Image (spheres, rainbow, N blue to C red):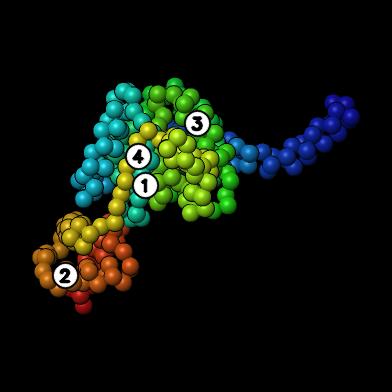
Amino acid sequence: MDSRLLDFLARAEQVLERLEPLLPALRPQLDWQACMAARWVRDGRSGYLMPLAVSLDLSLSDLLGVDAQREQLARNTRQFVSGLPANHALLWGARGTGKSSLVRALLAEHARAGLRLIEIERDHLADLPRVVELLAGLPQRFVLFCDDLSFEAGEGDYRVLKSVLDGSLEQAPDNVLLYATSNRRHLVPEHQSDNENWKRVDGELHPSEAVEDKIALSDRFGLWLSFYPFSQEHFLIVVRHWVDVQARQVGLNWSWDEALEKAAIRWALGRGNRNGRCAYQFARHWVGLQLLEQQT
């Protein structure tokens, strides 16, 4: 072989060795028959779907006190899984009240029917067109799930997201739906100054353009579900449920009494909130404490 050709091949190999670390790694195509959920991961200028190992042991019956919200989203999801028209959904309200848990419970409910869940972060929603492109034509039904979708004061990228959502959601195939959770109904902070430019026209009050601009983002979702803080009675019902679930899993005999109720109330007061997450955490604490005392 000619020496010049050998030299060229050697130089080409050196160049490839230097370029290879800069190239995105080849990602195997996901087997959606076996994979129930995935997360969109940004990789350089592109990204890929990383499979997730998810637990499907959370059922809709575990979500207490949110019957109306649960039924509405469950009905919307049944329509979607059945191939019928369904709406993108925004779940907003107090933290720890079961918004994201409801979405996970629906995955467990409909996984066998072909429902799949894809988590996508707020900062990666600009990649929606790419994600939708990867899912188009697949036989499964995909819920794109964005947890804690909100924007702080001064952030202007919600306008960019609004246009991305508008185009991506309108052109999304029938097997893709977007569910998002937020602590804010309109996803962005609303200030008193936004209302200073309201004006009266022919006796009617018209909002300023700033208010209209902010509300327009949440209008991309056809279904709005509100979640409210727990009352003490509601909180104790949820505590009792989770204590029972945790105790049955480890074979612990227990009974509801005044001491347990007061312990749950003190736990909530110490955390400064009453919600489903707080109730679940107390149940794990109390059951673990009883088991520890039995061992000692």
Q: What kind of element bears circle 3?
A: helix
Residue that badge 3 annotates = 166
Asked if the residues shown at circle 2 and circle 3 are in contact, with their CB atoms under 8 angstroms apart, the answer is: no
Label 2 and label 1: CA atoms lie apart by 31 Å
Q: Residue 137 in the image: x percent, y percent?
A: 44, 22
Give left or right: position of 77 versus 9. Answer: left
- Image quadrant holding the C terminus, namely bottom left
Tag in front: 4 or 2: 4
Residue that badge 2 annotates = 260
Q: The residue under label 4 is which amino acid type?
A: Trp
Tag in front: 2 or 1: 1
Dot placed on the residue nearer the N-terminal end, 4 or 1: 1
Dot placed on the residue nearer the N-terminal end, 2 or 3: 3
Disc sitting over residue 224 in the figure: 4
Depth order, front residue of 123/190 = 190
In which quarter of the view is residue 264 placed?
bottom left
Give left or right: position of 222 versus 43. Answer: left
Dot placed on the residue nearer the N-terminal end, 3 or 4: 3
Dot placed on the residue nearer the N-terminal end, 3 or 1: 1
Give left or right: position of 230 versus 100. Answer: left
Residue at point 48% right, 24% down? 171
Residue that badge 1 annotates = 92
Q: The residue under label 1 is which amino acid type?
A: Trp
Q: The residue under label 3 is which amino acid type?
A: Asp
Would you say residue 228 is visible in this rendering? yes
Give above or below for 9 relative to 275: above
Dot placed on the residue nearer the N-terminal end, 2 or 1: 1
